[in-house]
């Protein structure tokens, strides 16, 4: 990686500030002063800024409480993306481990660790996702078995994998999915003749949305949360 990028990622300083420090001779690589921002470095090099050793930038793992009206995409011509809520120098390198619809709220995981992200989303790893659902019409008790058996979604050849449905009220339930098809919860209820009016993701695997996070806020995952995936 380029030295200026490495320093910026490791310290949170802007590339512009890093360049200024480089020109001022504040940076040393393997104990030699270095002014070349484009110099290639790796985590095996000893990098010092202002005589302090700089640790290699590690991967980032975040949880975000997604608000309504934001899209889980890196770019969108009309709506704000969840990445605009992340105030970090490496925000543009994050990917979204399991997208939510624009009108779904709750837990979104973001990382620059591709393997970890794959474990969150790949159906092979069966990471359960828990959604709180509100519906337009009452949910009959018979839906529990239909969710368990699997539901044929419109224009899809295979039924959904067994999912758990727990009724919380006449029009409110918890759904646990072990796969992530496009608009899956909404389409499962639509296939039963109902309509989802509110959808909120509470949990992914054993990672629970932190109750301290207001919509739009995020925090780093703990090591235990990272290791749980
Ligand atoms: N299922 C949906 O229908 N939408 C989501 O955002 C997530 C799961």
Image (cartoon, grey):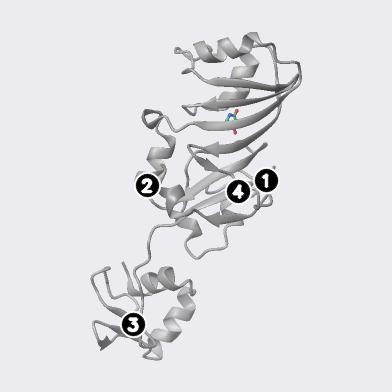
Mark closer to the observer (4, 2): 4
Residue 18 position by quadrant: bottom left
Screen quadrant of the N terminus: bottom left
What's the mark number on residue 48?
Answer: 3
Question: Tag 2 or tag 1, which sits nearer the N-term?
Answer: 1
Question: Ligand 1 shows up in which quadrant of the image?
Answer: top right
Q: Furthest residue to the bottom?
A: 24
Question: Tag 4 or tag 1, which sits nearer the N-term?
Answer: 1
Image x and y of residue 203, in percent: 55, 38
Q: Check if mark 4's residue and mark 3's residue have beta carbons within 8 Å.
A: no
CA gap, disc 1 and disc 2? 24 Å
Is residue 29 among the parts visible in the rendering? yes
Image x and y of residue 124, in percent: 36, 28
Classify mark 4 as within 8 Å of ligand 1 or not, answering yes or no.
no
Which residue does the numbered mark 1 point to in the structure image?
A: 67
Question: Tag 2 or tag 3, which sits nearer the N-term?
Answer: 3
* Residue 34, placed above or below residue 175: below
Which residue does the numbered mark 4 point to in the structure image?
A: 210
CA gap, disc 4 and disc 3? 36 Å
Which secondary structure, mark 4? Answer: loop
Q: Count of labels shown?
A: 4
Question: Tag 3 or tag 4, which sits nearer the N-term?
Answer: 3
């Amino acid at each position: 990686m380029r030295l200026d990028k490495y320093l910026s990622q490791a310290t949170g300083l802007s590339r512009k500030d890093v360049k200024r420090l480089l020109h001022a001779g504040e940076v040393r690589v393997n104990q030699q002063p270095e002014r070349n921002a484009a110099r290639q470095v790796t985590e095996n090099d000893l990098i010092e800024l202002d005589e302090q050793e700089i640790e290699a930038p590690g991967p980032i793992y975040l949880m975000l409480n997604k608000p309504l009206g934001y899209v889980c995409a890196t770019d969108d011509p009309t709506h704000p993306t969840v990445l605009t809520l992340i105030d970090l120098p490496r925000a543009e390198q994050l990917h979204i481990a399991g997208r939510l619809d624009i009108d779904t709220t709750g837990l979104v995981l973001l990382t620059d660790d591709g393997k970890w992200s794959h474990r969150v989303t790949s159906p092979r790893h069966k990471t359960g996702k828990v959604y709180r659902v509100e519906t337009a019409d009452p949910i009959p008790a018979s839906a529990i078995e239909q969710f368990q058996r699997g539901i044929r979604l419109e224009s899809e050849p295979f039924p959904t994998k067994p999912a758990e449905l727990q009724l919380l009220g006449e029009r409110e339930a918890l759904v646990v999915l072990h796969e992530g098809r496009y608009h899956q919860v909404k389409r499962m209820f639509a296939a039963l003749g109902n309509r989802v009016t509110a959808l909120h993701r509470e949990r992914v695997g054993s990672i629970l949305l932190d109750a301290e996070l207001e919509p739009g806020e995020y925090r780093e995952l703990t090591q235990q949360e990272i290791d749980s995936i």
